[in-house]
């Protein structure tokens, strides 16, 4: 595509914009009408632990999205000599779950409680019994009910509560809606009606009836939309929130706000039955689209949906690469100490590749990457931990391999139930996220963990921002009766390049040995959480 053609597309608004709020980065991508990448922008941010709550401040949200958009806009200007003033469609996605409650004056009642908080166990236990449905600690309804159990005074004033994506979309459009995939992380979704389970809504209202709150649960939840529906248009206020310069014109249609799990499924073409994906970054989760219901409730396995509303088995772990990243930063400090100038991408790549030289079972080393609690292994809080025996093989290769293994250890524990006990069949697992940026390494480790082939697409590096942009494209371009899965298969990924790695039997055996050591050592992690306050 020549620059002249691109300039015309940009001027005429024949583009789509996707913005995703990840755990450590807000990323925006501008795509052509053929889903080709034209420009990107990003902004780094970090969650904060304040008063025992993992949170982001509201100003962090808006400063972040504005900086991300300005960076993207500057790249458009630099590459094509065109000011970005209009766009064909916009989509916003973000980390799923969490708790953002507002009063009738649209005032946030308590600081944003993110997915990372594991303080709602009493609520989840009661709700699981009430609904006979898995309710993870990070789900929005768990946070709400825990606030009820805690007699928090703000609960009586709630007029609306939502996720991060839902909040940003509401501010940009005035619409209190949510894509079905993100909504399924707030409250259980009925795959038949493509809406919240009606009987569960009624049971919840009955459960809190004696509290005499002035609201009913259905009235304070976002309205559920499916992929392809228009979810409102950018208002004048929203346009200035996104682009304070005033250059961006209002009236741009927006697709339903999505969760990072949904955009990950789109970005990896895994919305069809018997497909799955693993997103590995600050957190890690696997999504496998189910052929049928599971035989029973598993506390380790969540049931959410695709952006079209099909049931998905989700294994979500709070911790993945945070501890690994911290160790790489220590190696960068070592390089700086001796005036060795090394690019961080080269450092990551070198250390990751070194890990493949290690012993298949990591030589007896053990680590836990628990920056926060991990419900899969029943920890409400965590302590990053590295431990070894005196006679182990303590080498750089084994050290790095250990931290790659432990990044995927909890996800393996959950998927052993799904793929083993339930016998769920998967034709392909797609990997995406930061863990897979070094070619072949994260892929090989994941294939060993799940004992299944793992594929990675070239677009996987763009991740959820690209996925939500594609959902915006689908809203604009879909033909009558064209499903999202057909759109992705026939129009987006038809010529996509990918690389598949098969599980190495020796790697599988080594990971299984490591996971037994990992399970046996959980008592060490427990002692660390009790001793290191």
Image (spheres, rainbow, N blue to C red):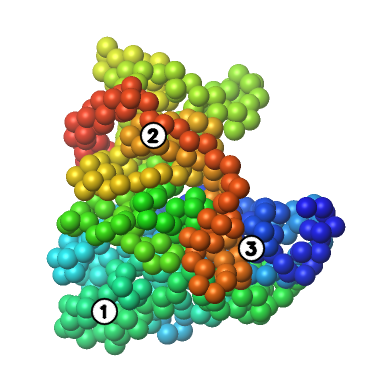
Q: Residue at x 54, y 33 (%)?
A: 438
The mark nearer the N terminus, 3 or 1, is: 3
Mark closer to the observer (1, 2): 2
Q: Do we see residue 20 in this rendering? A: no
Q: Which residue is mark 1?
A: 198
Q: Which numbered marker is on residue 384? A: none
Residue 400 visible from this viewpoint:
yes
Residue 447's mark? 2
Mark earlier in primary sequence (1, 2): 1
Residue 474 versus residue 425 in the image, above or below: below
Residue that appears at 29% across and 84% down? 216
Q: Residues at badges 1 and 2 in contact (C-beta under 8 Å)?
A: no
Q: Which residue does the numbered mark 3 point to in the structure image? A: 17
Identified at 45% across, 44% down, the residue is 430
| Quadrant of image for the C terminus | top left
How many residues crowd mark 2 within 10 Å: few (<14), some (14–19), many (20+)?
A: many
Question: Badges 3 and 1: C-beta atoms under 8 Å apart?
Answer: no
Q: Earlier in the sequence, mark 3 or mark 2?
A: 3
Q: Residues within 10 Å of mark 1 (few under 14, many from 20)?
A: few
Left or right: 159 as drawn, with respect to 164: left
What kind of element bears circle 2? helix
Question: Viewed as shown, does residue 228 lie left or right of 113?
Answer: right
From the top left corner, tell me how far across and down residue 421 is, in percent.
19, 45
Residue reaching furthest top? 391
> Left or right: 305 with respect to 326?
left
Residue 15 in picture, x, y percent from top left:
69, 64
- Give the alpha-carbon distance from disc 3 to disc 1, as whole Å: 35 Å
x, y (%) of residue 176? 46, 78
Instruction: Provide the secondary structure element on which disc 1 rests.
Output: helix
Q: Nearer the viewer, residue 195 or 51?
A: 195
> Who is closer to the viewer here, 525 or 293?
293
Q: Residue at x 19, y 69 (%)?
A: 131
């Amino acid at each position: 595509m020549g620059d002249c053609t691109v300039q015309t597309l940009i001027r005429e608004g024949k583009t789509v914009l996707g913005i995703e709020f990840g755990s450590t980065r807000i990323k925006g991508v501008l795509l052509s009408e053929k889903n080709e990448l034209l420009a990107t922008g990003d902004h780094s941010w970090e969650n904060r632990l304040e008063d025992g709550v993992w949170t982001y401040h509201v100003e962090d949200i808006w400063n972040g999205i504005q900086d991300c958009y300005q960076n993207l806009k500057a790249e458009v200007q630099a590459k094509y000599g065109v000011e970005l003033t209009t766009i064909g469609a916009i989509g916003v996605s973000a980390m799923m779950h969490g708790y953002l409650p507002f009063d009738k004056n649209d005032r946030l009642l308590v600081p944003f409680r993110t997915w990372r908080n594991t303080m709602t166990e009493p609520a989840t236990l009661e709700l699981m019994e009430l609904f006979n449905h898995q309710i993870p600690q990070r789900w929005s309804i768990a946070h709400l009910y825990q606030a009820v159990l805690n007699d928090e005074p703000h609960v009586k004033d709630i007029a609306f509560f939502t996720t991060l994506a839902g909040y940003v979309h509401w501010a940009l459009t005035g619409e209190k809606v949510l894509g079905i995939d993100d909504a399924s992380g707030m409250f259980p979704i009925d795959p038949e009606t493509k809406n919240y389970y009606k009987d569960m809504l009624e049971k919840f209202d009955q459960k809190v009836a004696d509290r005499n709150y002035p609201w009913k649960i259905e009235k304070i939840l976002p309205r559920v939309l499916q992929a392809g529906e228009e979810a409102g248009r950018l208002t004048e206020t929203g346009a200035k929130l996104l682009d304070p310069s005033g250059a961006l014109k209002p009236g741009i249609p927006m697709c339903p706000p999505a969760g990072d799990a949904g955009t990950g499924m789109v970005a990896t073409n895994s919305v069809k039955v018997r497909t799955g994906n693993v997103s590995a970054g600050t957190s890690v989760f696997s999504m496998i689209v189910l052929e049928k219901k599971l035989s029973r409730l598993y506390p380790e396995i969540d049931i959410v949906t695709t952006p079209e509303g099909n049931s998905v088995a989700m294994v979500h772990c709070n911790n993945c690469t945070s501890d690994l990243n911290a160790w790489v930063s220590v190696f960068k400090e070592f390089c700086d100490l001796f005036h060795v100038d090394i690019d961080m991408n080269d450092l990551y790549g070198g250390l990751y590749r070194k890990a493949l030289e290690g012993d298949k079972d990591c030589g007896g080393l053990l680590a836990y990457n628990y920056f926060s609690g991990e419900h899969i292994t029943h920890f409400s809080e965590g302590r990053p931990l590295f431990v070894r025996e005196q006679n182990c093989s303590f080498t750089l290769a084994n050290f790095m391999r250990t931290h790659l293994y432990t990044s995927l250890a909890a996800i393996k524990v959950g998927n052993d139930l799904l793929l083993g006990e339930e016998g769920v069949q998967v034709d392909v697992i797609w990997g995406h996220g930061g863990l897979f940026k070094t070619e072949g390494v994260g892929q090989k480790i994941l294939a060993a963990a799940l004992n299944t082939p793992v594929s990675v697409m070239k677009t996987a590096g763009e991740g959820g921002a690209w996925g939500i942009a594609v959902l915006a494209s689908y809203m604009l371009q879909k033909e009558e009766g064209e499903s999202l899965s057909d759109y992705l298969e026939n129009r987006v990924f038809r010529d996509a390049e990918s690389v598949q790695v098969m599980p190495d039997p020796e790697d599988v055996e080594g990971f299984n040995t490591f996971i037994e050591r990992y399970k046996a050592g959980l008592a060490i992690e427990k002692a660390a959480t009790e001793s290191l306050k």
